[in-house]
Image (cartoon, rainbow, N blue to C red):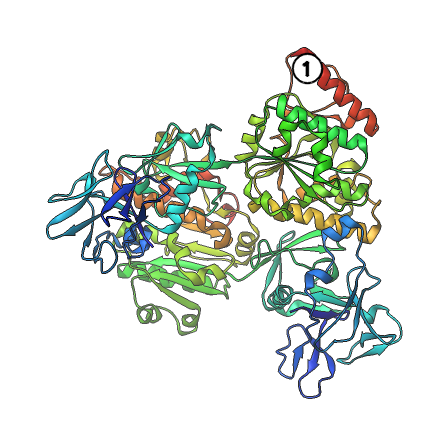
Amino acid sequence: MTALLTWQGTLLCRHRTTGGLVQRTFDSALDDADLVDIGIPAEQMQVTFANHLRNDIDLSLHVTEGALAGWSVTRAADGRSINLQRDGQFLSAIHRSEAIASVPHTRDWEGFLPLSPADVDALRALRGNEWMVRSNGARVPPQDIRFSEFCDLRLGPLSFDLRWQVPLDLSAWPNRLTLLRDGWRIEQFCRYRPLVYFAAFGNEAIMRQFALSVRSLVTYGCYDGDIAVLTDHTPEEIAAMLPAFDRPRVSVLRCDARDRWAFMAARYMIADWADAWLYQPLLYVDADTIFDADIAPILRAIACSDRMSAPVEVFSPLRTAASVGAGLLQLDGCDPRSMHGFNSGTIGIPNLAEHAATLKLIATIIANNAALKGRDSLTFADQEVANYVSYKIGRFDTSLLSPYVKVGWDTSVPRDNRHGILHFWGVTGSQERADAMAAYLQALEAYT
Amino acid sequence: MTALLTWQGTLLCRRRTTGELIQRPVNSPLDDADLVEIGIPAERLQVTFSNHMRNDIGLSLQVAEGALAGWSVTRAADGRSINLERGGQFLSALYRSEVVRTASHANDWEGFLPLSPTDIETLRAIAANDWVVRSNATRVVAHDIRFTAFCGLKLGPLAFDLRWQVPFDLSAWPNRLTLLSDGWRIEQVCRFRPLVYFTAFGNEAIMRQFALSVRSLVTFGRYEGDIAVMTDRTPEEIAAMLPAFDRPRVLVFPCPARERTGFMAARYSIPDWPEAWQYQPLLYADVDTIFDADIAPVLRAIACSDRISAPLEWFSPLRTTVSVGASLLQRDGCEPGSEIGFNSGTLGIPNLFEHAHPLRMIGRIMTNNATLKAPGSRDDDDQVVANYVSFKLGHFDTMLLAPYVRV
């Protein structure tokens, strides 16, 4: 199946009732027409590196079947599109119309760009998502993505000529896409479909923390994306803890965690939930977290990163602080010198396609360690292993999240210094922590 | 298909002629026996993270069919293997023997580790290849890889207990494998199957350079691996240029490059050659290169790297030197500061699974610029584009090769 893009950014189709050739837009439902298949593999007609090596982009083919049977294919003057010719007439996509005509000359309107099924699918999916421009962090919502004249793909203010993109580079698809402005300027786009997820198990105080955290996320965090919670509670129990407007956005992932060890380790199981692979970025937060400012900048930074991220703990040197894995690092003969560890209560994960293996490695080591030395052998549970794995394979970025995450010690709201994420691990006791979070939230409400 | 590894590192098999249970080495050709299939999916028998979340690794299953029909399956004392019991007797793999019999107790010999077909293929492939230990760049040759007692996997001096590895982390397989010694210490091993490749086109002087370079590679470079050349010459013409003993190692990859631009660009088309994906590392060298010392350290370093490498050209600042892409960088509004460019005449590519993308991106931009560039511009020169792509995508390491390459 090879489809054809017209010069004005529509797809060449065949009307189902009349059989006539027509143009349809990319996001058309195609309920009255079918895509025209030229019947020649796209790779025979698209210009590739092999053409460049041969210094030869010429084409001379004949369509033998389908709606275009009998038409001859030659390379168009732009060096990328094709012209379709029969009896001295060239197929032509009429400007600002859905009509297809034939004319005795070849100019712009007579150029058609061959697209493979993968190209067509990707271009359609592009419009079904929001994207981020990696070079400047700008958001491009779906309504700002358009196909226009001269095979143009517009993503917000940026414009790309599709003739210099196909076959599309889908090596990191569907999370990343590299496009070339002017045929060579590299721009990377990162899909933006965020998920914030929690792990909340056990007693009422923890669940109260979770409910407060979600409330702060959607109000002061200005978050309108999906939320998930790994929990031992039922969906009904979780729903009862949340305001009605939050409920449809919260996915409940049942998890048979038995004890504190399992509660702490559950965050690394997110890759086992198949739907989680559809998101970019993913942000894990402990339930004892209050969001006190718009988290969009945090999520955009994570989406555009190549590494997982966690906030640095400036008071926890990897060399000596057991809480960040110093014991494991020493036992393994590592020398982290002056490096600092991170707190695993906030983890930014760009996407699971690239990072699930690291999460799984952390989980495996946590599980092996528990089996060999006992479930209580690591006082600081997952955080020790996560820091060890990060040190050994260099995967966590500790600078990206740090400006946004602060430890919550008291309940006073800073006048003009809210960072985004306040982690209340500094308050001792689950109930006391929930109380502190509630008080902070109350102060925040009073303040604003 | 779930097979069973005995405690002494053999596979539980059934002799084809007598039907008796026996042990066979993991890399045995199995010409007189078949692997015993327990008939229960490995994922039900192996311990996963979910088991730990539930704090429950208990097992109580019954084998319903096959060579082990009628045996009961329970979790062994090590928390990872299984015991097979019938009528108060436990299946037991005898030490330093190929015999399998029954015993009235369950100790070490009575433990069997369930392996999926993927696990078995992985173990066989581990034993069939050379590897480099990433933490110290030591090479482990295939004949130093053994399966030993207590489900041991020995890679040279390193020992791993397979009970703490399965199911394997195959996220970077077959090029990289992460193993855990003592159940938690991370060791990464990188497959070592090197390819040195050249591009040689056109006139006789170029082909003479190629022949001299190959000669130096196998003599002073002490290189024993495969060599490839992308060329417009026939295999017979290439063979005629090389000493007889080099010929079988030189793979000829016909490439239809037409002129100088194509000759220079050909190195980036290596991902289009399917066989190239089997190698790690790949080293590209221009034909005007002489190897004057053992290149094994270079190859080991490339194999263990996460990035493509090329030697720094200290006299070519990215900000001002056109030959390393200054013009493209300036026009794209990039600010390379004091960064220095690289020479693309030597490229270290860890493997193509991870690194075909930037090579293809370089090829794409060269192709586009060849059509779009202004007359006289160097926007489609390979080194110009490679430096631009490296700056934008941050993929090339300019320090790794630099100590080994001189003008």
Residue B289: x percent and y percent? 40, 55
Q: Secondary structure at mark 1?
A: helix
Q: Residue sitting at 61 percent across and 46 percent down?
A: A356
> Residue B406 versus residue A154: which sits nearer the camera?
A154
The vertical placement of B217 against A37, above or below, is below
Q: Chain of mark 1?
A: A
**Residue A39 in the image: x percent, y percent?**
28, 57
For badge 1, the amino acid type reads: Glu
Mark 1, other Cα within 10 Å: few <14 / some 14–19 / many ≥20: few
- Tell me what residue is drawn at x 40 percent, y 45 percent: B361
Would residue A137 be found to the left or right of residue A400 on screen? left
* A354 or A208: nearer the viewer: A208
Quadrant assignment, res A415: top right
Q: Position of residue A67 (x, y in %)?
A: 24, 54
Please identify the quadrant where the N terminus of chain B is shown.
bottom right
Q: Answer left or right for B172 relative to A116.
A: right
Q: Looking at the image, can residue A395 be seen?
A: yes
In this rendering, the answer to whether B347 lies above or below B245 is: above
State the residue in front, B364 or A199. Answer: A199
Residue B314 seen by the camera: no
Point out residue B323 in the picture as x, y percentages from the top left corner.
35, 39
**Residue identifier under label 1:** A445
Q: Is residue B347 left or right of residue A347?
A: left
Along the line of sight, the residue nearer the viewer: A175 or B202: A175
